[in-house]
Image: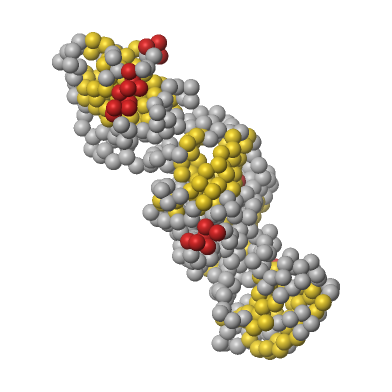
Amino acid sequence: MRSVFILAVLVGASSLSAQIPIRVGQTLTGKLSQSDQSFSDGSHYKLYAFVGNKGDTVAVDLSSDDFDANLLVADAAGNTLARNDDSGEKCNARLTFVPPSTGNFRVYANSSAQAELGAYTLTLARGRARAAADTVCRGFGRVTGLVEVGQTVTGALTSDDPEFPTDSTYYQRWILPVRPNQAFTVDLVSDDFDSYVMLTRGRGEKLVENDDGGGGCNARLVYTATDDHPLRVVVNTASRPRRQTGKFTLKVTEGESQTETKGNCRFTGGAAAAAGGAVATQASMGNRQPGQLQAIRVGETLNGSLTSNDSLYPDNSYFKFYQFTATAGQVITIDLSSDDFDPVLIVRGDDLDASVINDDGGPGCSARISRSFPSRGPYRILVNTTSDPEKQTGRFSLSITQGAKPVQQTNGNSDCQPPQSPTHTGTGAAAAAAASHAITIGQTQQGSISRSDVLLTSDSTYAQEWTIQGRAGTTITIDLESDDFDSYLFLRGPGISGGRDFQDDDSGGNCHARLTATFPQTGSYEIVVNTADHYATGAFSLSVTSGSKPKSVARCNRNSQ
């Protein structure tokens, strides 16, 4: 709450020429803008003048959906006589004023926080102000500052900033003035924390959000304003680890910039490390770090076995860890072969943008990775199997050799004849290719993402396509729900260029995806069932309904698996 004494001094200094006349019994609308006068706390105000009669009772109301309203009434000399912040319900201001004498008085239409802007309604009525049913202000809150389109600001999230109680992350609100139909891009960049940015209206209604759309662990969102009501950029962090802090750069540019579909975030910033724990950006099981990893050297071959005592992925495939070091920039070849199971080779490292995965790149069903590495490492090898059939075990040979060897393309090796279970009718890749998924409006389908599905190499997530027939102008809502992974949705087809309007992460609440879209043309479209986390798999429910559904404002807050 601002000091009454300071405000009284500033009120006395107000220019008489800036006063707007208003009568008791009158309602006026106005707008707080950057050009308006401001108090020492950075909050803007407009000054009104009215004539009051001694002993009269005047009810003064100031309401706004753009800012947290604050009212002050003063005499002609600038002495503060009455003030109110939230007695008008929903963060609006309301007070009852009885003039101590007949004369001229001032009303200040003000905001409660610095930099707040926007439209408001001011009413002076005879009689006492109505008592509010609820005077708790929700949705506005503390504002850090103002950022304009075309501007870059720097700041820092600290433990003194407000904290979201749902996921224990710090945040800041920044006011963003906009024009109708103005397209802009918001970038949040930090080396200290995993960036998360939201765009809301004044009362907190979420319009759009983004985690890693700026590449790496940086956030980028793109939006087109529908009107000139100021918006709020919420600078925030990912929910894991909790209470991340540090420096950031917030940049707003004119126009729509390209966003990463989902970033390949492998955040290892100092602030995150200080907060404790690693950010869960890899597959839940694959991120497990054994205390001691068996080492393998370049030029060495190791023979081993996968057994039912080894670690198990959620897709019911066993895996075993090894570790090696490399010479930076020097090409090596890693081979994994087995006569007992269909091998899958996975290599991970802290300086790799994503895990390197191969299935049938070597002779027959053998897996092969041939490449150079950016540093000495160490790097981790996961000896793994395809998920179909499940729980494959048996002996294998793992080798690392100097130099490059040919690697089969991602469509696999035609010579591969993997071991079959009694109920198995084909390889995972073949089954996935042959599978035909379709859904219609009004239908709900159950499915499962597995490691047999298409792997998106850009962000190391699995994807599954569902066909739907669309008619131009028809609006649908697609819901993707899963208890096994953080859902992510795409819609692609005729007339869709891949913009932000045709993908979604958490709008269904509780890490579920909800996408409302209107078909641009009549034709066949594809719903892409996807995940937000690297290599995540599991069961899901996919439904398509006619019309639109509201987005959930609940943040995704699942515990790391």
Nearer to the camera, 331 or 24: 331
Q: Position of residue 83 (x, y in %)?
A: 27, 27
Nearer to the camera, 229 or 242: 242
Is residue 458 found left or right of 361 in the rendered image?
left
- In terms of image quadrants, where is residue 56? top left
- In terms of image quadrants, where is residue 448? bottom right
Q: Position of residue 76 (x, y in %)?
A: 28, 13
Task: Tell me if residue 207 can be seen.
Answer: no
State the residue lying farthest toward the left.
55
Q: Position of residue 240 (x, y in %)?
A: 49, 60
Relative to 491, is 185 above or below? above
Is residue 345 found left or right of 401 in the rendered image?
left
Residue at left offset 57%, top offset 71%: 287
Q: Position of residue 189 (x, y in %)?
A: 59, 48
Count of numbered circles on the image: 0
Residue at left offset 48%, top offset 22%: 35
For the N terminus, the image quarter is top left
Relative to 371, is 71 above or below? above
Q: How is the image coloured?
A: secondary structure
- In terms of image quadrants, where is residue 256? top right
Residue at left offset 66%, top offset 69%: 349
Residue at left offset 66%, top offset 80%: 322
Relative to 446, is 169 above or below? above
Relative to 201, is 76 above or below? above
Is residue 434 found left or right of 75 in the rendered image?
right
Task: Tell me if residue 475 can be seen.
Answer: yes
Nearer to the camera, 143 or 160: 160
